[in-house]
Amino acid sequence: DVKVTQSSRYLVKRTGEKVFLECVQDMDHENMFWYRQDPGLGLRLIYFSYDVKMKEKGDIPEGYSVSREKKERFSLILESASTNQTSMYLCASTSPRGGRSYEQYFGPGTRLTVT
Amino acid sequence: GQSLEQPSEVTAVEGAIVQINCTYQTSGFYGLSWYQQHDGGAPTFLSYNALDGLEETGRFSSFLSRSDSYGYLLLQELQMKDSASYFCAVRRSSASKIIFGSGTRLSIRP
């Protein structure tokens, strides 16, 4: 089974802090994604990555950056956390191999609260 | 703009059938997916339609009409464990980039 893990389930940070959210997948997937989930808004794509050191902006990249130094690890960085970044953050991965690149595997999520 | 529309809430009775509709307007369309998410859990993949028609997977079926920009998820023989949120999602490119709807919360009554 594919396993996607995230470094924390719950995180509380103060406004202005730099925040790192880590995601690791164990299935050698090329593609990795970061979403945020807010009530009534569904999942919105922040950034995604096709390969190591490759990244592309999603629909709401403002205030975020990402890093992918190793294939299995994709990090989301909040350079200066703000209260409007309080949300559930979900990481996902998939692979273009095998013809099932439409099937994304999600981690358990990190609920971030910025005070 | 890009949008997916689905009902915010649906209530159904255990053992019955329920249909959750999704209409979409997106730039680029490769297929329509459905995901299930229980409270406190991660979204899990249910089905994918790239071509028009019905795809069946056990008690769940998914339908797509590309000409109508419309799809639905059909859940049969509802069980209490089916109480969850269901998201439709459009795959916008071959590179797996997906846009999600806002989700439908399905509540099952005994």
Image (spheres, helix red, strand yellow):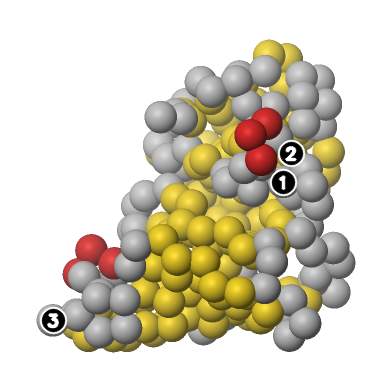
Q: Nearer the viewer, mark 2 or mark 1?
A: 1
Q: Chain of mark 2?
A: A
Q: Is residue B31 above or below residue B22?
A: above
Looking at the image, which residue is at 62% across and 63% down?
B49
What residue did someone put label 2 on? Answer: A48
The answer to whether residue A115 is visible is no
Q: Estimate the spatial distance between the alpha carbons at disc 2 and disc 1, rounded to whole Å.
A: 10 Å
What is the crowding at mark 2: few (fewer than 14 residues within 10 Å), some, or many (at least 20)? many
Front residue of A115 and B48: B48
Looking at the image, which residue is at 68% across and 79% down?
B65
Marks 2 and 3 share the same chain: no
Q: Chain of mark 3?
A: B
What residue did someone put label 3 on? Answer: B110
Front residue of B48 and A14: B48
Dot 1 amino acid type: Ser
Q: Is residue B35 left or right of residue A75?
A: left
Q: Is residue A10 left or right of residue B79?
A: right
What residue did someone put label 1 on? Answer: B96
Q: Estimate the spatial distance between the alpha carbons at disc 3 and disc 1, rounded to whole Å.
A: 38 Å
